[in-house]
Amino acid sequence: ATATRALFMLFGATGDLAKRKLYPSIFNLFKKGYIDNDHFALIGTGRREWSDDTFRGVVMDSINDSADSDEQAQSFASHFYYMSHDVTKPEHYDALSDYANKLDAQYEINGNRIFYISMAPNFFGTVAKNLKVHNCLSDNGGFNRLIIEKPFGRDYDSAEELNNALGKSFNEDQVYRIDHYLGKEMVQNILALRFGNPLVEGIWNNKYIDNVQVTLSEKLGVEERAGYYDGAGALRDMIQNHTMQMLSILAMEQPISFRDVDVRREKIRALRSMHIYTPDEARENFVRGQYGSNGDQKDYRHEDNVPNDSTTETYVAGKVEFNNQRWANVPFYIRTGKMLTDKFTRIDIVFKKPLIDIFAAADNSESQLNNNVLTLFVDPVNKVVLHLNGKKAGQGMEMKPLDLTHVQNDEEKAATPEPYERLIHDAILGNATNFASWDEVSRAWEFADVIRHVWDTDQPDFPNYTPGSMGPKAADDLLSRDGRAWVFNS
Ligand code: NAD
Protein backbone atom coordinates (compact mmCIF):
# COMPACT_ATOMS: atom_id res chain seq x y z
CA ALA A 1 0.00 0.00 0.00
CA THR A 2 1.17 3.51 -0.73
CA ALA A 3 0.67 5.66 2.31
CA THR A 4 -0.44 9.21 1.68
CA ARG A 5 0.34 12.15 3.90
CA ALA A 6 -2.79 14.08 4.70
CA LEU A 7 -4.25 16.72 6.95
CA PHE A 8 -8.02 16.36 7.31
CA MET A 9 -10.19 19.27 8.26
CA LEU A 10 -13.59 17.92 9.25
CA PHE A 11 -16.63 20.17 9.67
CA GLY A 12 -19.31 18.48 11.73
CA ALA A 13 -16.89 16.45 13.87
CA THR A 14 -19.39 16.13 16.72
CA GLY A 15 -22.11 14.85 14.39
CA ASP A 16 -23.73 11.50 13.87
CA LEU A 17 -22.15 10.66 10.52
CA ALA A 18 -18.65 11.42 11.79
CA LYS A 19 -19.04 9.04 14.72
CA ARG A 20 -20.82 6.25 12.91
CA LYS A 21 -18.97 6.23 9.60
CA LEU A 22 -16.09 8.63 9.20
CA TYR A 23 -13.88 7.82 12.21
CA PRO A 24 -14.17 4.04 11.74
CA SER A 25 -13.38 4.47 8.02
CA ILE A 26 -10.35 6.67 8.59
CA PHE A 27 -9.19 4.25 11.28
CA ASN A 28 -9.33 1.33 8.86
CA LEU A 29 -7.27 3.28 6.35
CA PHE A 30 -4.78 4.05 9.12
CA LYS A 31 -4.65 0.39 10.16
CA LYS A 32 -4.15 -0.81 6.60
CA GLY A 33 -1.39 1.72 6.04
CA TYR A 34 -3.18 3.74 3.36
CA ILE A 35 -2.74 6.85 5.48
CA ASP A 36 0.83 7.60 6.44
CA ASN A 37 0.75 6.91 10.17
CA ASP A 38 3.49 9.40 10.97
CA HIS A 39 2.34 12.14 8.66
CA PHE A 40 -1.33 12.52 9.34
CA ALA A 41 -3.54 14.76 11.46
CA LEU A 42 -7.22 15.60 11.68
CA ILE A 43 -8.72 18.85 12.88
CA GLY A 44 -12.32 18.29 13.89
CA THR A 45 -14.64 21.23 14.27
CA GLY A 46 -18.10 21.68 15.68
CA ARG A 47 -20.02 24.18 17.70
CA ARG A 48 -19.47 22.46 21.02
CA GLU A 49 -16.66 23.37 23.37
CA TRP A 50 -14.68 20.16 23.44
CA SER A 51 -11.11 19.58 24.54
CA ASP A 52 -8.78 17.44 22.44
CA ASP A 53 -9.16 14.75 25.10
CA THR A 54 -12.95 14.74 24.87
CA PHE A 55 -12.70 14.54 21.09
CA ARG A 56 -10.17 11.69 21.24
CA GLY A 57 -12.43 9.85 23.66
CA VAL A 58 -15.31 10.08 21.19
CA VAL A 59 -13.07 8.91 18.36
CA MET A 60 -11.81 5.96 20.41
CA ASP A 61 -15.36 4.98 21.33
CA SER A 62 -16.34 4.99 17.69
CA ILE A 63 -13.51 2.63 16.66
CA ASN A 64 -13.71 0.44 19.74
CA ASP A 65 -14.84 -2.65 17.88
CA SER A 66 -12.13 -2.65 15.28
CA ALA A 67 -9.00 -1.69 17.22
CA ASP A 68 -6.49 -4.48 17.81
CA SER A 69 -5.36 -2.92 21.08
CA ASP A 70 -5.80 0.10 23.31
CA GLU A 71 -2.41 1.41 22.26
CA GLN A 72 -3.38 1.24 18.64
CA ALA A 73 -6.60 3.16 19.28
CA GLN A 74 -4.73 5.72 21.36
CA SER A 75 -2.00 6.13 18.82
CA PHE A 76 -4.66 6.75 16.15
CA ALA A 77 -6.63 9.18 18.30
CA SER A 78 -3.49 11.15 19.19
CA HIS A 79 -3.60 12.56 15.65
CA PHE A 80 -7.00 14.16 16.31
CA TYR A 81 -7.34 17.82 17.33
CA TYR A 82 -10.49 19.69 18.14
CA MET A 83 -11.41 23.30 17.49
CA SER A 84 -14.67 24.87 18.51
CA HIS A 85 -15.73 26.74 15.43
CA ASP A 86 -18.85 28.43 14.18
CA VAL A 87 -18.78 28.01 10.42
CA THR A 88 -20.84 31.16 9.94
CA LYS A 89 -18.23 33.36 11.68
CA PRO A 90 -15.56 34.33 9.14
CA GLU A 91 -13.01 35.30 11.79
CA HIS A 92 -13.00 31.73 13.12
CA TYR A 93 -11.34 30.52 9.93
CA ASP A 94 -8.17 32.50 10.59
CA ALA A 95 -7.52 30.42 13.70
CA LEU A 96 -8.24 27.30 11.70
CA SER A 97 -5.77 28.28 9.02
CA ASP A 98 -3.03 28.90 11.61
CA TYR A 99 -3.73 25.60 13.30
CA ALA A 100 -3.61 23.74 9.99
CA ASN A 101 -0.23 25.27 9.16
CA LYS A 102 1.10 24.39 12.60
CA LEU A 103 0.01 20.75 12.37
CA ASP A 104 1.19 20.53 8.78
CA ALA A 105 4.66 21.55 9.92
CA GLN A 106 4.59 19.35 13.03
CA TYR A 107 3.63 16.20 11.07
CA GLU A 108 5.49 17.18 7.88
CA ILE A 109 2.39 16.76 5.77
CA ASN A 110 3.64 18.81 2.81
CA GLY A 111 0.41 20.67 2.23
CA ASN A 112 -1.92 17.76 1.38
CA ARG A 113 -5.35 18.77 2.66
CA ILE A 114 -8.72 17.09 2.64
CA PHE A 115 -11.65 19.23 3.70
CA TYR A 116 -14.68 17.19 4.64
CA ILE A 117 -18.01 18.98 5.11
CA SER A 118 -20.27 16.71 7.10
CA MET A 119 -22.92 19.23 8.04
CA ALA A 120 -26.38 20.34 7.03
CA PRO A 121 -26.26 21.30 3.32
CA ASN A 122 -27.12 24.96 3.91
CA PHE A 123 -23.58 25.35 5.30
CA PHE A 124 -21.71 23.78 2.34
CA GLY A 125 -21.31 27.05 0.41
CA THR A 126 -20.33 29.15 3.43
CA VAL A 127 -17.64 26.73 4.53
CA ALA A 128 -16.15 26.40 1.05
CA LYS A 129 -16.06 30.16 0.56
CA ASN A 130 -14.43 30.93 3.88
CA LEU A 131 -11.82 28.22 3.49
CA LYS A 132 -10.46 29.99 0.45
CA VAL A 133 -10.88 33.56 1.65
CA HIS A 134 -9.14 32.78 4.95
CA ASN A 135 -6.27 30.84 3.42
CA CYS A 136 -7.12 27.44 4.83
CA LEU A 137 -6.07 25.87 1.52
CA SER A 138 -2.38 25.04 1.26
CA ASP A 139 -0.31 26.70 -1.44
CA ASN A 140 2.95 24.83 -1.32
CA GLY A 141 2.35 22.10 -3.89
CA GLY A 142 0.22 19.74 -1.81
CA PHE A 143 -3.31 18.86 -2.87
CA ASN A 144 -6.49 20.54 -1.66
CA ARG A 145 -9.59 18.42 -2.00
CA LEU A 146 -13.13 18.95 -0.80
CA ILE A 147 -15.36 16.02 0.14
CA ILE A 148 -18.93 17.07 0.38
CA GLU A 149 -21.91 15.22 1.81
CA LYS A 150 -25.33 14.92 0.32
CA PRO A 151 -27.84 16.23 -0.51
CA PHE A 152 -26.36 18.30 -3.31
CA GLY A 153 -29.22 20.80 -3.71
CA ARG A 154 -32.97 20.18 -3.72
CA ASP A 155 -33.53 20.99 -7.39
CA TYR A 156 -31.49 22.13 -10.38
CA ASP A 157 -31.41 25.80 -9.40
CA SER A 158 -30.32 25.28 -5.81
CA ALA A 159 -27.74 22.71 -6.89
CA GLU A 160 -26.34 25.14 -9.45
CA GLU A 161 -26.18 27.88 -6.86
CA LEU A 162 -24.32 25.58 -4.50
CA ASN A 163 -22.01 24.45 -7.23
CA ASN A 164 -21.19 28.04 -8.18
CA ALA A 165 -20.42 28.77 -4.53
CA LEU A 166 -18.04 25.78 -4.33
CA GLY A 167 -16.53 26.79 -7.66
CA LYS A 168 -15.30 30.06 -6.21
CA SER A 169 -12.95 28.12 -3.95
CA PHE A 170 -12.39 24.73 -5.58
CA ASN A 171 -12.08 23.55 -9.17
CA GLU A 172 -14.37 20.76 -10.29
CA ASP A 173 -11.48 18.27 -10.15
CA GLN A 174 -10.97 19.11 -6.46
CA VAL A 175 -14.60 18.45 -5.50
CA TYR A 176 -15.59 14.95 -4.35
CA ARG A 177 -19.37 14.68 -4.03
CA ILE A 178 -20.31 11.70 -1.89
CA ASP A 179 -22.85 9.20 -3.19
CA HIS A 180 -22.21 6.21 -0.99
CA TYR A 181 -23.92 3.85 -3.45
CA LEU A 182 -20.88 4.36 -5.66
CA GLY A 183 -18.79 2.91 -2.84
CA LYS A 184 -20.72 -0.37 -2.82
CA GLU A 185 -18.92 -3.47 -4.00
CA MET A 186 -21.61 -4.68 -6.39
CA VAL A 187 -22.13 -1.27 -7.96
CA GLN A 188 -18.41 -1.18 -8.79
CA ASN A 189 -18.68 -4.78 -9.93
CA ILE A 190 -21.10 -3.74 -12.69
CA LEU A 191 -18.14 -2.29 -14.58
CA ALA A 192 -16.12 -5.48 -14.10
CA LEU A 193 -18.99 -7.74 -15.13
CA ARG A 194 -19.78 -5.67 -18.20
CA PHE A 195 -16.38 -4.70 -19.54
CA GLY A 196 -14.47 -7.78 -18.39
CA ASN A 197 -16.80 -10.25 -20.09
CA PRO A 198 -17.54 -10.29 -23.82
CA LEU A 199 -20.22 -12.82 -22.92
CA VAL A 200 -22.05 -10.16 -20.95
CA GLU A 201 -21.18 -6.99 -22.85
CA GLY A 202 -21.93 -8.68 -26.16
CA ILE A 203 -25.60 -9.00 -25.26
CA TRP A 204 -25.84 -5.76 -23.26
CA ASN A 205 -28.12 -4.02 -25.75
CA ASN A 206 -31.64 -3.84 -27.12
CA LYS A 207 -31.20 -6.88 -29.32
CA TYR A 208 -31.07 -9.14 -26.28
CA ILE A 209 -32.27 -7.12 -23.30
CA ASP A 210 -36.01 -6.65 -22.90
CA ASN A 211 -35.98 -4.35 -19.87
CA VAL A 212 -33.92 -3.42 -16.83
CA GLN A 213 -35.27 -3.12 -13.28
CA VAL A 214 -33.60 -1.33 -10.40
CA THR A 215 -35.11 -1.65 -6.92
CA LEU A 216 -33.95 0.14 -3.76
CA SER A 217 -36.23 -1.22 -1.09
CA GLU A 218 -36.36 -0.22 2.55
CA LYS A 219 -38.15 -2.10 5.28
CA LEU A 220 -38.27 0.72 7.79
CA GLY A 221 -40.25 3.96 7.78
CA VAL A 222 -38.78 7.43 8.33
CA GLU A 223 -37.52 6.76 11.87
CA GLU A 224 -35.80 9.88 13.31
CA ARG A 225 -35.19 11.46 9.92
CA ALA A 226 -38.78 12.67 9.46
CA GLY A 227 -37.81 16.33 9.85
CA TYR A 228 -35.52 16.16 6.86
CA TYR A 229 -37.39 13.52 4.92
CA ASP A 230 -40.75 15.21 4.88
CA GLY A 231 -39.20 18.23 3.16
CA ALA A 232 -37.41 16.03 0.63
CA GLY A 233 -39.38 12.91 -0.35
CA ALA A 234 -38.22 9.71 -2.03
CA LEU A 235 -37.60 11.32 -5.43
CA ARG A 236 -34.92 13.60 -4.01
CA ASP A 237 -33.71 11.22 -1.33
CA MET A 238 -33.16 8.11 -3.47
CA ILE A 239 -33.92 8.61 -7.17
CA GLN A 240 -32.08 11.79 -8.19
CA ASN A 241 -28.83 10.54 -6.65
CA HIS A 242 -28.34 6.80 -6.05
CA THR A 243 -30.73 5.44 -8.65
CA MET A 244 -29.55 7.81 -11.39
CA GLN A 245 -25.95 6.91 -10.62
CA MET A 246 -26.68 3.20 -10.96
CA LEU A 247 -28.62 3.80 -14.18
CA SER A 248 -25.73 5.69 -15.71
CA ILE A 249 -23.33 2.81 -14.99
CA LEU A 250 -25.78 0.26 -16.39
CA ALA A 251 -26.47 2.28 -19.53
CA MET A 252 -23.07 3.77 -20.35
CA GLU A 253 -20.85 2.86 -23.28
CA GLN A 254 -17.42 1.35 -22.69
CA PRO A 255 -15.01 4.00 -21.39
CA ILE A 256 -11.66 4.19 -23.18
CA SER A 257 -9.95 3.48 -19.86
CA PHE A 258 -10.80 2.92 -16.23
CA ARG A 259 -9.50 6.40 -15.30
CA ASP A 260 -11.97 8.69 -13.55
CA VAL A 261 -12.21 11.22 -16.39
CA ASP A 262 -12.96 8.48 -18.91
CA VAL A 263 -15.55 6.68 -16.78
CA ARG A 264 -17.29 9.91 -15.88
CA ARG A 265 -17.34 11.04 -19.51
CA GLU A 266 -19.34 7.95 -20.47
CA LYS A 267 -21.67 8.20 -17.50
CA ILE A 268 -22.44 11.78 -18.47
CA ARG A 269 -23.04 10.77 -22.09
CA ALA A 270 -25.49 8.11 -20.91
CA LEU A 271 -27.35 10.60 -18.73
CA ARG A 272 -27.48 13.08 -21.60
CA SER A 273 -29.17 10.48 -23.76
CA MET A 274 -31.75 9.89 -21.03
CA HIS A 275 -35.07 11.27 -22.17
CA ILE A 276 -36.29 14.17 -20.02
CA TYR A 277 -40.05 13.93 -19.76
CA THR A 278 -42.62 16.58 -20.50
CA PRO A 279 -45.05 17.10 -17.60
CA ASP A 280 -47.64 14.88 -19.27
CA GLU A 281 -45.10 12.14 -19.92
CA ALA A 282 -44.01 12.40 -16.29
CA ARG A 283 -47.61 11.84 -15.16
CA GLU A 284 -47.80 8.80 -17.37
CA ASN A 285 -44.44 7.26 -16.51
CA PHE A 286 -43.95 7.99 -12.83
CA VAL A 287 -45.91 6.76 -9.85
CA ARG A 288 -45.69 8.00 -6.28
CA GLY A 289 -46.88 6.50 -3.05
CA GLN A 290 -47.17 7.11 0.65
CA TYR A 291 -47.54 4.33 3.16
CA GLY A 292 -50.73 3.91 5.11
CA SER A 293 -51.30 1.97 8.29
CA ASN A 294 -51.64 -1.73 8.83
CA GLY A 295 -52.75 -1.89 12.43
CA ASP A 296 -49.33 -2.23 14.14
CA GLN A 297 -47.62 0.31 11.95
CA LYS A 298 -48.86 3.90 11.96
CA ASP A 299 -49.33 5.57 8.62
CA TYR A 300 -46.70 8.03 7.43
CA ARG A 301 -48.86 11.03 8.31
CA HIS A 302 -48.90 10.00 11.95
CA GLU A 303 -45.17 9.49 12.31
CA ASP A 304 -43.40 11.91 14.68
CA ASN A 305 -42.55 15.23 13.06
CA VAL A 306 -44.71 14.61 10.00
CA PRO A 307 -47.67 16.95 9.39
CA ASN A 308 -50.90 14.96 9.26
CA ASP A 309 -51.74 16.33 5.81
CA SER A 310 -48.28 15.65 4.35
CA THR A 311 -48.17 15.00 0.60
CA THR A 312 -44.57 13.79 0.70
CA GLU A 313 -43.98 10.60 -1.26
CA THR A 314 -42.36 7.67 0.53
CA TYR A 315 -42.42 5.58 -2.66
CA VAL A 316 -41.49 6.21 -6.29
CA ALA A 317 -41.65 3.96 -9.33
CA GLY A 318 -40.94 5.07 -12.85
CA LYS A 319 -39.89 4.23 -16.34
CA VAL A 320 -36.71 5.74 -17.76
CA GLU A 321 -35.73 5.75 -21.44
CA PHE A 322 -32.37 6.23 -23.08
CA ASN A 323 -32.52 7.66 -26.58
CA ASN A 324 -29.60 5.96 -28.18
CA GLN A 325 -28.80 3.08 -30.50
CA ARG A 326 -28.02 0.65 -27.68
CA TRP A 327 -31.14 1.21 -25.63
CA ALA A 328 -33.91 2.23 -28.03
CA ASN A 329 -37.13 0.50 -26.88
CA VAL A 330 -35.60 -0.88 -23.67
CA PRO A 331 -37.35 0.60 -20.64
CA PHE A 332 -35.44 0.93 -17.39
CA TYR A 333 -37.94 0.56 -14.55
CA ILE A 334 -36.88 1.98 -11.22
CA ARG A 335 -38.51 1.94 -7.81
CA THR A 336 -37.74 2.81 -4.24
CA GLY A 337 -39.77 3.08 -1.09
CA LYS A 338 -40.03 2.89 2.64
CA MET A 339 -41.96 0.27 4.58
CA LEU A 340 -41.66 -2.32 1.83
CA THR A 341 -41.31 -6.07 2.28
CA ASP A 342 -37.60 -6.05 3.03
CA LYS A 343 -34.37 -4.06 2.93
CA PHE A 344 -32.45 -4.75 -0.27
CA THR A 345 -31.09 -3.27 -3.45
CA ARG A 346 -31.14 -5.33 -6.63
CA ILE A 347 -30.78 -4.90 -10.35
CA ASP A 348 -32.61 -7.28 -12.69
CA ILE A 349 -31.53 -7.41 -16.31
CA VAL A 350 -34.39 -9.11 -18.13
CA PHE A 351 -33.47 -10.72 -21.47
CA LYS A 352 -35.77 -11.46 -24.38
CA LYS A 353 -37.15 -14.91 -24.96
CA PRO A 354 -36.04 -16.90 -27.99
CA LEU A 355 -37.94 -15.81 -31.09
CA ILE A 356 -38.96 -19.40 -31.69
CA ASP A 357 -39.61 -21.95 -28.96
CA ILE A 358 -38.88 -25.32 -30.55
CA PHE A 359 -39.88 -27.17 -27.37
CA ALA A 360 -43.40 -25.82 -27.38
CA ALA A 361 -43.66 -26.17 -31.15
CA ALA A 362 -43.07 -29.93 -30.92
CA ASP A 363 -46.37 -30.76 -29.28
CA ASN A 364 -48.13 -27.42 -29.69
CA SER A 365 -48.04 -26.90 -25.94
CA GLU A 366 -47.64 -23.53 -24.30
CA SER A 367 -44.07 -22.26 -23.96
CA GLN A 368 -42.43 -23.13 -20.67
CA LEU A 369 -39.51 -20.82 -21.29
CA ASN A 370 -38.87 -18.01 -18.85
CA ASN A 371 -37.05 -14.82 -19.66
CA ASN A 372 -33.38 -15.15 -18.82
CA VAL A 373 -32.63 -12.75 -16.00
CA LEU A 374 -29.30 -11.60 -14.68
CA THR A 375 -29.81 -10.36 -11.12
CA LEU A 376 -27.18 -8.30 -9.35
CA PHE A 377 -27.83 -8.17 -5.61
CA VAL A 378 -26.23 -4.99 -4.29
CA ASP A 379 -27.52 -5.20 -0.69
CA PRO A 380 -27.50 -6.75 1.83
CA VAL A 381 -25.50 -9.63 0.29
CA ASN A 382 -23.32 -9.39 -2.78
CA LYS A 383 -24.67 -11.97 -5.13
CA VAL A 384 -25.00 -12.55 -8.86
CA VAL A 385 -27.63 -14.93 -10.19
CA LEU A 386 -28.15 -15.87 -13.81
CA HIS A 387 -31.56 -17.40 -14.38
CA LEU A 388 -31.54 -19.73 -17.37
CA ASN A 389 -33.86 -22.39 -18.77
CA GLY A 390 -32.73 -25.99 -18.56
CA LYS A 391 -34.07 -29.46 -19.03
CA LYS A 392 -35.93 -31.27 -16.34
CA ALA A 393 -34.24 -34.62 -15.64
CA GLY A 394 -36.06 -37.60 -17.11
CA GLN A 395 -37.75 -38.70 -20.28
CA GLY A 396 -38.91 -36.15 -22.84
CA MET A 397 -38.07 -32.49 -23.00
CA GLU A 398 -39.71 -30.67 -20.15
CA MET A 399 -38.10 -27.37 -19.18
CA LYS A 400 -37.23 -26.06 -15.74
CA PRO A 401 -35.43 -23.04 -14.34
CA LEU A 402 -31.67 -23.43 -13.97
CA ASP A 403 -29.94 -20.84 -11.81
CA LEU A 404 -26.22 -20.07 -11.76
CA THR A 405 -25.38 -18.31 -8.52
CA HIS A 406 -22.29 -16.60 -7.22
CA VAL A 407 -22.45 -15.46 -3.60
CA GLN A 408 -19.71 -13.46 -1.98
CA ASN A 409 -17.91 -15.74 0.50
CA ASP A 410 -16.69 -14.81 3.98
CA GLU A 411 -13.21 -14.03 2.77
CA GLU A 412 -14.51 -11.67 0.09
CA LYS A 413 -16.86 -10.14 2.59
CA ALA A 414 -14.00 -9.45 4.98
CA ALA A 415 -12.05 -7.84 2.13
CA THR A 416 -14.95 -5.55 1.24
CA PRO A 417 -14.51 -2.09 2.72
CA GLU A 418 -17.45 -0.02 3.89
CA PRO A 419 -18.46 2.52 1.22
CA TYR A 420 -17.14 5.42 3.29
CA GLU A 421 -13.77 3.77 3.81
CA ARG A 422 -13.40 3.11 0.11
CA LEU A 423 -14.51 6.59 -0.91
CA ILE A 424 -12.27 8.43 1.55
CA HIS A 425 -9.41 6.28 0.31
CA ASP A 426 -10.21 7.19 -3.30
CA ALA A 427 -10.25 10.88 -2.38
CA ILE A 428 -6.84 10.52 -0.72
CA LEU A 429 -5.55 8.96 -3.93
CA GLY A 430 -7.16 11.66 -6.05
CA ASN A 431 -9.40 9.17 -7.84
CA ALA A 432 -12.83 10.67 -8.49
CA THR A 433 -14.33 7.70 -10.39
CA ASN A 434 -16.77 6.89 -7.62
CA PHE A 435 -17.91 10.40 -6.87
CA ALA A 436 -20.69 12.28 -8.61
CA SER A 437 -19.52 14.98 -11.02
CA TRP A 438 -21.42 18.20 -11.50
CA ASP A 439 -22.54 17.24 -15.01
CA GLU A 440 -24.06 14.02 -13.67
CA VAL A 441 -25.71 15.67 -10.69
CA SER A 442 -27.14 18.51 -12.74
CA ARG A 443 -28.53 16.23 -15.44
CA ALA A 444 -30.19 14.08 -12.80
CA TRP A 445 -31.82 17.19 -11.34
CA GLU A 446 -33.12 18.20 -14.75
CA PHE A 447 -34.76 14.81 -14.98
CA ALA A 448 -36.17 14.84 -11.44
CA ASP A 449 -37.35 18.46 -11.51
CA VAL A 450 -40.05 17.81 -14.12
CA ILE A 451 -41.53 15.03 -12.01
CA ARG A 452 -41.23 17.06 -8.83
CA HIS A 453 -43.00 19.97 -10.45
CA VAL A 454 -45.89 17.79 -11.62
CA TRP A 455 -46.20 16.23 -8.18
CA ASP A 456 -46.12 19.60 -6.46
CA THR A 457 -48.95 20.72 -8.75
CA ASP A 458 -51.23 17.65 -8.73
CA GLN A 459 -52.93 16.52 -5.53
CA PRO A 460 -51.95 12.95 -4.61
CA ASP A 461 -54.34 10.30 -3.42
CA PHE A 462 -52.47 9.27 -0.29
CA PRO A 463 -52.00 6.95 1.51
CA ASN A 464 -51.98 4.35 -1.23
CA TYR A 465 -49.91 1.37 -0.13
CA THR A 466 -49.76 -0.99 2.78
CA PRO A 467 -46.63 -1.35 4.93
CA GLY A 468 -44.98 -4.67 4.14
CA SER A 469 -46.05 -4.66 0.48
CA MET A 470 -43.98 -3.73 -2.57
CA GLY A 471 -45.83 -0.45 -3.09
CA PRO A 472 -48.99 0.88 -4.75
CA LYS A 473 -50.86 -1.03 -7.42
CA ALA A 474 -50.08 1.72 -9.93
CA ALA A 475 -46.42 0.59 -9.82
CA ASP A 476 -47.45 -2.84 -11.07
CA ASP A 477 -49.73 -1.29 -13.69
CA LEU A 478 -46.78 0.72 -14.99
CA LEU A 479 -45.22 -2.55 -16.16
CA SER A 480 -48.31 -4.58 -16.93
CA ARG A 481 -49.51 -2.00 -19.47
CA ASP A 482 -46.20 -2.69 -21.28
CA GLY A 483 -46.87 -6.44 -21.03
CA ARG A 484 -44.23 -6.83 -18.32
CA ALA A 485 -43.96 -7.45 -14.59
CA TRP A 486 -41.51 -6.77 -11.78
CA VAL A 487 -39.13 -9.73 -11.42
CA PHE A 488 -39.22 -9.38 -7.66
CA ASN A 489 -42.76 -9.11 -6.42
CA SER A 490 -43.76 -10.51 -3.08
P1 NAD B 1 -25.53 16.10 12.71
O1 NAD B 1 -26.68 17.02 12.89
O2 NAD B 1 -25.41 14.90 13.56
O3 NAD B 1 -24.18 16.92 12.88
C1 NAD B 1 -24.06 18.25 12.45
C2 NAD B 1 -22.68 18.80 12.78
O4 NAD B 1 -22.63 20.14 12.32
C3 NAD B 1 -22.33 18.83 14.26
O5 NAD B 1 -20.97 18.49 14.41
C4 NAD B 1 -22.51 20.32 14.63
O6 NAD B 1 -21.66 20.76 15.68
C5 NAD B 1 -22.11 20.97 13.34
N1 NAD B 1 -22.67 22.31 13.19
C6 NAD B 1 -23.97 22.69 13.04
N2 NAD B 1 -24.06 24.02 12.94
C7 NAD B 1 -22.79 24.51 13.01
C8 NAD B 1 -22.22 25.81 12.95
N3 NAD B 1 -22.95 26.93 12.79
N4 NAD B 1 -20.87 25.91 13.04
C9 NAD B 1 -20.12 24.81 13.19
N5 NAD B 1 -20.59 23.57 13.26
C10 NAD B 1 -21.92 23.42 13.18
O7 NAD B 1 -25.52 15.72 11.15
P2 NAD B 1 -25.06 14.31 10.49
O8 NAD B 1 -26.16 13.34 10.61
O9 NAD B 1 -23.72 13.95 11.00
O10 NAD B 1 -25.00 14.70 8.94
C11 NAD B 1 -23.94 15.45 8.36
C12 NAD B 1 -24.08 15.48 6.87
O11 NAD B 1 -24.02 14.16 6.35
C13 NAD B 1 -25.38 16.05 6.33
O12 NAD B 1 -25.13 16.71 5.12
C14 NAD B 1 -26.23 14.82 6.05
O13 NAD B 1 -27.17 15.05 5.04
C15 NAD B 1 -25.16 13.87 5.59
N6 NAD B 1 -25.51 12.47 5.75
C16 NAD B 1 -25.71 11.93 7.00
C17 NAD B 1 -25.99 10.59 7.12
C18 NAD B 1 -26.17 9.96 8.48
O14 NAD B 1 -26.36 8.75 8.51
N7 NAD B 1 -26.13 10.68 9.56
C19 NAD B 1 -26.08 9.78 6.01
C20 NAD B 1 -25.87 10.35 4.76
C21 NAD B 1 -25.57 11.69 4.66
Image (cartoon, rainbow, N blue to C red):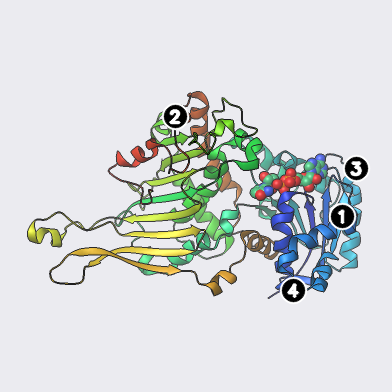
Residue 427's place in the image compared with 452, above or below, is below
- The reply to whether the C-beta atoms of the residues labelled 2 and 4 are less than 8 Å apart is no
Point out the frontmost of discs 4 and 1.
4
Residue labelled 3 has its Cβ within 8 Å of some atom of ligand 1: no
Q: Dot 1, crowdedness within 10 Å: few (<14), some or many (≥20)?
A: many
The image quarter containing residue 301 is top right
Q: Which residue is mark 4?
A: 68
Q: Which residue is mark 3?
A: 91
C-alpha span from label 2 to label 4 = 57 Å
The percent position of residue 40, horizontal first and vertical second, equals: 81, 66
Q: Hey, what amino acid is under mark 2? A: Pro
Say the numbered circle drawn on residue 279.
Answer: 2
Local SS, label 2: helix
Return the disc, 3 or 2, that comes first in the chain's sequence.
Answer: 3
Point out the frontmost of discs 2 and 4.
4
Q: Tell which residue pokes out farthest to the front in this image.
A: 295
Return the disc, 3 or 1, that comes first in the chain's sequence.
Answer: 1
Horizontal relation, residue 484 to residue 230: left or right: left
In this view, the residue in front, 52 or 453, is 52
Return the disc, 4 or 3, that comes first in the chain's sequence.
Answer: 4
Q: Which residue is mark 1?
A: 82
Q: Is residue 3 visible?
A: no
Residue 292's place in the image compared with 168, above or below, is above
Return the disc, 2 or 1, that comes first in the chain's sequence.
Answer: 1
Q: Hey, what amino acid is under mark 1? A: Tyr
Q: Hey, what amino acid is under mark 3? A: Glu
Residue labelled 4 has its Cβ within 8 Å of some atom of ligand 1: no
